[in-house]
Structure formats: C-alpha cells, structure tokens
Image: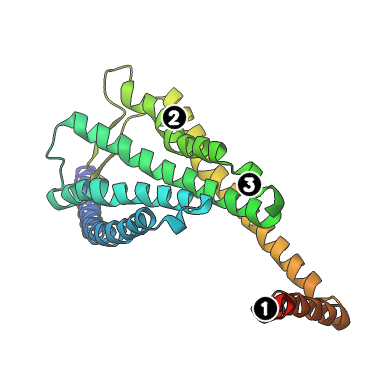
Amino acid sequence: MNLNFTWNGTESDILNEDCNNHISKNDLESFRWFGIVIGILDIVVGGFGNGLTIAAFLTNRKLWSTFNIFIVNLSIIDFLTAVFMMPLHVVGYVLMEWPFPQWMCAFQAYIYFCCGYTSVVCLVAITLNRLVGIVYPLHYKRFFSSCRTSLAIVFCWFVAPLFLLPFLIFSNSDGTQMMGWREDQLLCTFTNLEPEFELYMKIMRLLFQFSPACIMIVSYTISVWDVSQTSSSTLLKPPTLRADRSRRTSRKSMDKSPSNSFSETR
C-alpha cells in the first residue's frame, strides 16, 4: 500500500513536471514569436523614422536649435539600437541560440544596455530643456549656451557606458562572465551576478530608471502648471485692458507699415 502510494506520488510528480515543462516551452515559443514580430517592427519603423529625423536635421540648418540638437541625439541612439542591436535580437529569437562567439554576446548586451540607458538620459535632458524654456524663458540662453549644451551632450553619451563598464570588464569569482546568453529569455543580457554586483545593479536601476521617471514627471507637472497659470492670468485680465493693448499693438503696426513710412518721406 505504501509502495503503491509512493509510486503514484512519483508518477504524479513526473506528470506535473512534464506539464510544467510543456507550459514553459509553450510560453517560450509565444514569447519567441512575439519578440520576432516586435523586433522586425522596431527595425523598420525605428530605422526609417529616426533616419528621416537625422537626415532632416543635417540638411536643414534652420532646425539647428538647442532643443533639436537634443532631439537628434536621441534619434541617433534609437537609430543605432534599431539598425544594429535589434537584428541580433531577432537572430537569437529565430535560432533560439547565440550563433556567434560568447564574447560578442557579452559585448552586444553591453552596447544594448548602453543605448537604452543613454536614451533615458537624453529624455531627461530634453525634459529639463523644455522646463527651463517654459518656466524660465529669460534665462534659457544662459542655461543652454553652446558650451553648456556641448557638455550636456557629452555627458548624455558617456555617463551610462561608464556606469555599465564594470559588468563588461570584470567577471565573477568563479571566472564566469556577468553578461551572456540567457536561454529562458533568448537574448544576451545579465546572467550571473554576485551579491556586490546585484547591489550595484540596484543602484544603476535607481539612477537610470526610477530617478529619470521622477524627474520627468515632476518637470512636466511644473511646466503644465506654469502654462495653465499663465493662460488663466491672461484670461482673467479685464476686457478693457486687453482691448487697449490690442489697439496699441495695431497702432504701432500701422505706424511701421510701408505706406506710412512712404507718406512721411514725401
């Protein structure tokens, strides 16, 4: 009786394990096809859209403003991600393995996360640029001079790669790399992290994920509030003041019109 119970229990465990493996394989297969579709869309849409943005900026000098410089840097990062990083992800999803050397897998993961975090930093720079332009328009040129804008762009491009560099150049105590191929995710990413690097990863997520989200939410909230306050204060002015201002504006425009200047010369 006990043997029969034990055998039945073992059999049920085996069946449950096979069922779980089957479900996990089905989930992985669904994730694989989803990754292929999203990857191809990202390559086409991201490559074409960001490529057009970059081309328009380079061919039209009228677009060379401080704000557009930040925008085009974000487009360059997204273009590199779509054209160079996503095809490697699609290859991994299609083959369900990494066909290249392992060091290339670690390097590809490093570049991919560099592009992602650099994109976030550029979004923060764009947000702060809009905040200063809306809330402090008189100080905009002082905050975003040519020198400071150049330094901000250099900071955007190099801060994330420097923070991520330890994951690429260092290895675990057993000699294994911290970046490599993950069979459960079908991509090159972080694999084995020791406790000290797990803490470092939490700090990275705080700096490049949580903090930027908070900065952007607060900045856009302040910008929207400032715009709403300005609009409401304009609408609350007495109609006579607005009419007087419009009459003064029209009178000045008439004084500066070509016909008046011509009559004065006569």
Judged by depth in the image, the label closer to the viewer, 1 or 3, is: 1
Please tell me whether residue 178 is drawn above or below residue 29 in the rendered image.
above
* Front-lying residue, 241 or 93: 241
Give the alpha-carbon distance from disc 1 to disc 2, as whole Å: 66 Å
Earlier-in-chain disc, 1 versus 2: 2
Pointer 1: what residue?
A: 262
* Front-lying residue, 130 or 15: 130
* Front-lying residue, 239 or 32: 239
Q: Taking the image as drawn, is residue 176 in sight?
A: yes
- x and y percentages locating residue 42 in the rendered image: 29, 58
Residue projecting furthest to the front: 266
- Tell me the kind of residue under disc 1: Phe
Pointer 2: what residue?
A: 163
Q: Is residue 206 left or right of residue 90?
A: right
Give the alpha-carbon distance from disc 3 to disc 2, as whole Å: 30 Å
Q: Secondary structure at mark 3?
A: helix
**How is the model colour-coded?**
rainbow
- x and y percentages locating residue 215 in the rendered image: 60, 47
Pointer 3: what residue?
A: 141
Q: Are marks 1 and 3 in contact (CB under 8 Å)?
A: no
- Name the residue located 80 percent from the left edge and 81 percent from the top edge: 247
Please tell me whether residue 206 is drawn above or below residue 131 in the rendered image.
above
- x and y percentages locating residue 30 in the rendered image: 23, 60
Q: Secondary structure at mark 1?
A: helix
Earlier-in-chain disc, 1 versus 3: 3
Judged by depth in the image, the label closer to the viewer, 3 or 2, is: 3
Quadrant for residue 112, please give it. Answer: top left
Q: Is residue 21 left or right of residue 142?
A: left
- Tell me the kind of residue under disc 3: Lys
